[in-house]
Image: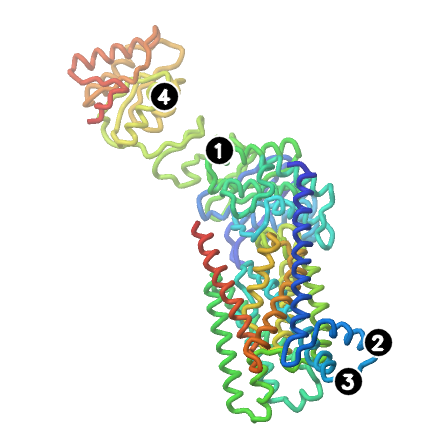
Amino acid sequence: MTSTEEKQKSSFHHRRFILVMLLLGSLLLLGLVLNVSTGSVTIPPGDILRMLWNAVLGKRTGSTQENILLLIRLPRLLLAGILGGALAVSGFLLQSFFRNPIAGPFVLGISNGAKMVVGLTMIFFSGFLRGAGSFALVLAAFVGALMITLLVLLFSQKVRNMSMLLVVGIMVGYICSAVTDFCITFANEQDIVNLTSWSMGTFCGAGWDDVKTAVWICVPTVLAAWLLSKPMWAYSLGEGYAQSMGLAIKLFRIALILLSSLLSACVTALAGPVSFLGIAVPHITRTLLKSSKPALAIPATFLCGSVFCVLCDLIARTAFAPTELAIGTVTSAFGAPVVIYMMVRRRRQEEG
Amino acid sequence: MAYFETRDLTVGYDGKPLIHDINLCIEKGTITTLIGPNGAGKSTILKTITRHLAKIYGTVFLDGNLISVQTSRKLAKKLAVVLTDRVRPELMTCAEVVSMGRYPYTNLVGKLTPEDRAIVTDALRRVGAEDLAQRDFLTLSDGQRQRILLARAICQEPEVLVLDEPTAYLDIRYKMELLDILRQMAREKGITVILSLHEIDFALKLSDNLICVKGDTIYAFGSPEEILRHHSIEDLYNMETGSYNRLFGSVELKKPVGKPRVFVIAGNGFGAKVYRRLQRAQIPFATGILFENDIDAQIAWELSDQVVTAPAFEPMTQEQVDAAAKILVQCERVIHSGTPTGSLNQANESLLRIARENGIPIFREEDTAWNR
């Protein structure tokens, strides 16, 4: 193999990356259009563009259709897109951290930990929250996510076996859920009105404020994660090799955990727990790319997460309209089978 | 000061010293091998040198600089490793694994320059794995994986290469190929190689220096010749069964014990396979008459207590025949290994005659009935 051949091969990876990005991009566009136009009020795609253009020019008519588009559907859609991508990247980071494709914020109990602290905050500090808005919720979720991540890490030093760690993570997740449910049972009815629908996981009721918060948190975090692609790739050869190549392991691990927790916390705070998306999407992306190179996989994972989440939200919203499904219900239905398939395939690989 | 030096180094885990007073001087471009029994602490020493483990006491110098104060990136340009860790990267081609070796040289996002790519290709060529470049690393056999990991280390362009049991899990051909590559790297590129090996025979033939680790200290350090002159391999490994032949660098399994039941007439290398068959059946035997420079003698001494030998380059004498005959008449049978008789070893013909006169059955080497 000569160096030119190798170059061709690496440009094959890049070509594939561009193809995948184009595919995901058009799927996202399709998802966006479908999502905006369908629902109790149908808005023809042609009108969407016109209304958007008018909104940009500041010539809003104030029609019902326009309000539905600009105040309800559009922010919801954007939030689903951003948070879906963020959660997928969060999963990707955790998988890099544990060097195992079956890690994710939901199965390790991190989402439920975030949910617990957010729930407690909503119940006990509801007065304070009204002033602070969604940033305070994200902060609470971040505390919860970090707490559970550190707990799982503590266990991971005792149990080297990944399946054991997953069992621990799932159990911790249940404990957190139990605490949340316990508090809900004894909380003021007034406080739990928001809480119950939120704790199921939904994008319903998303506003522009939420979108802003999500952008402010997720965009820099994902960028920072992308800047860690080089050490992340080296880390996939194992700690020993990574260290011998000059990687500052401790710092890197801390950065990975912080970024991943921040992303999953943001999702949990703004939309509630969304299950299996964090495991399934990075896997789908790697399979599409035929590569796990983080420099390519992180942007593709983000995009793929957006598509997945937007389409799942479409299903959640329209499948049994006017009843809405929880977003977690739909992501589980599509995500869990992917996870089962991965586990079975991995087992076969290990035996074979 | 030598190129690579340790002074009063103490190594161990969790602050508990395991091996102390490690004082090594290693010259540039040499191969140094750590040998010693399982669990002796070979890996602990190597991991301390590579800074994977914190040292407990002492200093390590590389090219006149303290290793402990260098930044990890700077050290990474000087020292590369092949570890025993199991590597399981998802969806990574071999070329990608090898290109990781460029880590300390590439920019923030790890972009490979054309020079980097050329170095990757060269490293793959050096280990003879060009054709594996685009294969998924996880689909490789153990031998191929080890070669790719070696190429990764070479790609790091180190001055010192540290390998922890690189030949484990490899078959004989891959073992030899791998060690040959190390020799080339040392000779052609002046890379200083420090490794641990289980195969004592390879260690003696490959290394410029041996470090024998035993107990809580370095049992011996020096060239293979020096080590063999002063120490026995049996002692180093606490071998209670079998033996190690210094001249051949070969091992023999447990010697059959007891009064000899078979007398083997041997010489000129014809006896060796008979000895080994008897060893497998654990039948104690005597043998003779062998010239001291005969290769049969080397193996006979490892496997039998009753070896009748004659000084080389002289005809055999009547005393030697008498000594052999005395043992032979006590045996149940004689095996004639097929050694040819010339003017200097007529004595073997006399032994055959004595056997016939005493009614002791004589078998040929190829006769399978001899051990019934």
Q: For mark 3, name the chain.
A: A
The percent coordinates of residue B242 (x first, y second) are: 35, 35
Residue A96 visible here: yes
Which residue is denoted by mark 4 in the rendering? Answer: B296
Residue B28 visible here: no
Q: How many marks?
A: 4
Mark seen at residue B173: 1
Three-letter residue code for mark 1: Arg
Are the residues under marks 3 and 2 on the same chain? Answer: yes
Three-letter residue code for mark 2: Leu
Picture quadrant of residue B94: top right
Q: What separation in Å lies between label 3 and label 1 (alpha carbons)?
A: 80 Å
Q: Which quarter of the rendered picture does the C terminus of chain B lie within?
A: top left
Q: For mark 1, name the chain.
A: B
Label 4 sits on a secondary structure element that is helix
Task: Assess disc 4: are there few (<14), some (14-19) or many (≥20) residues with their C-alpha within 10 Å of its C-alpha.
Answer: many
The mark that comes first in sequence, 3 or 2, is: 2
Which residue is denoted by mark 2 in the rendering? Answer: A57
Label 2 sits on a secondary structure element that is helix
User: Disc 3 or disc 1, which is closer to the eye?
Assistant: 3
Task: Assess disc 2: are there few (<14), some (14-19) or many (≥20) residues with their C-alpha within 10 Å of its C-alpha.
Answer: few
Task: Assess disc 3: are there few (<14), some (14-19) or many (≥20) residues with their C-alpha within 10 Å of its C-alpha.
Answer: few
Q: What separation in Å lies between label 2 and label 4 (alpha carbons)?
A: 101 Å
Q: For mark 2, name the chain.
A: A
Label 3 sits on a secondary structure element that is loop
Which residue is denoted by mark 3 in the rendering? Answer: A62
Q: Which quarter of the rendered picture does the N terminus of chain B lie within?
A: top right
The mark that comes first in sequence, 4 or 1, is: 1
Q: What separation in Å lies between label 4 and label 1 (alpha carbons)?
A: 27 Å
